[in-house]
Image (cartoon, helix red, strand yellow):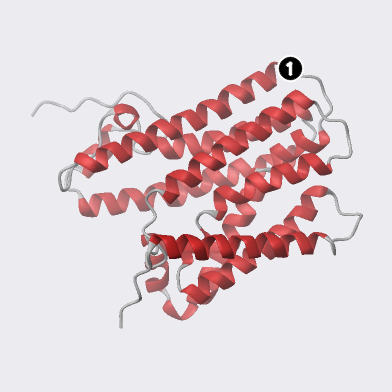
Amino acid sequence: MTAPRWSRRASFAWLAGGYLAAFAVAWVTLLFVPEDFDSFWTVAVADLAATLVVFAFSRGLKCSSMYDAYWSIAPIVIVFYWVFQAEEAVNPVRAGAVLFLVTWWGVRLTYNWARSWPGLHHTDWRYVIMKEKVPSLWFFTDLFGIHLFPTVEVLLGLSGAWVALTQGTSPLSWIDLLALVVTAGAITIETVADQQLVAFAKVKRPGEIIKTGLWAYSRHPNYFGELSFWWGLYVFGLAADPGYVWTVAGPLMMTAMFVGVSIPWMDRRSSERRPEYADHMRQVNGLVPWFPKKTQAS
């Protein structure tokens, strides 16, 4: 028996309901977190509770992609909570920049996801592979691999923003300017890359590879933009207070995931579906944009 085909309207209604329930549970959870917890660990507990609610909806609706938008929506809620709970008088310009950039990133990424999401009948192909690989462990793979791991990863990625919004009282410096350039540039790169990909998808022929725009210099310029965003937030934390060395765990974790998992998976899938992709891989960098290698004349 095939799964029912959800309409986009019904799918988004369930998504909105599930996320509202998740954030409501997170808010109630905040009331029970010990007062001696700092705001980072307070959010960690609430974030975990919200993720479990999303997981429950994912299981009930039989769609693990129910979680996907949580990656970009939750950070907006989190950074605003942090700034309003800050006990120290942090630099308002730095805090305003971080709030704006995270909101810009989150709204843009959520929109980019939403405009191409077919609905709850669709599950990300990577999740399908994970389920088929070890079906007997799918419940745990779904819980820990698809829901909890990204939540932890994103929270650690936001740790630099937490320092900038709640801990750092230092005046603005050239490091803030560097952080602004990196983070805003990252969002711009990701935006342009995604738009170029959407435009290409409308006119491409079967098996054709995108080789124009930013995609002529990187096989995954959207991933490069995404990674640069998280490193930019880390630099904001350095500008606010360089003493929080552990916050580098966030962007390092992101880098390991994209370089070690996401890019290899995407390249393998593209190689299987597009005959020219193997040559494309030899000519174009996987992540960091750079001039493509020239092919040798036969």
Give left or right: position of 275 versus 98.
Answer: left
- Rendering coords of residue 129 (x, y %): 37, 66
* Quarter of the image that includes the N terminus: bottom left
Picture quadrant where residue 93 is located: top right
Residue 215 vertical position relative to residue 155 in the rendered view, above or below: above
Residues 287 and 125: in front is 125
Type of amino acid at the residue the image marks with label 1: Ser
- Name the residue rendered at 67%, 48% in the picture: 77
- Rendering coords of residue 91 (x, y %): 80, 26
- Name the residue rendered at 69%, 22% in the picture: 176
Residue 88 vertical position relative to residue 148 in the rendered view, above or below: above
Query: In the current view of this chain or complex, which residue is farthest to the bottom?
Result: 1
Query: In the current view of this chain or complex, which residue is farthest to the top?
Result: 174
- Can residue 286 be seen in the rendering of this structure? no
**In the rendered image, which residue does mark 1 sit on?**
173
Residue 33 vertical position relative to residue 132 in the rendered view, above or below: above
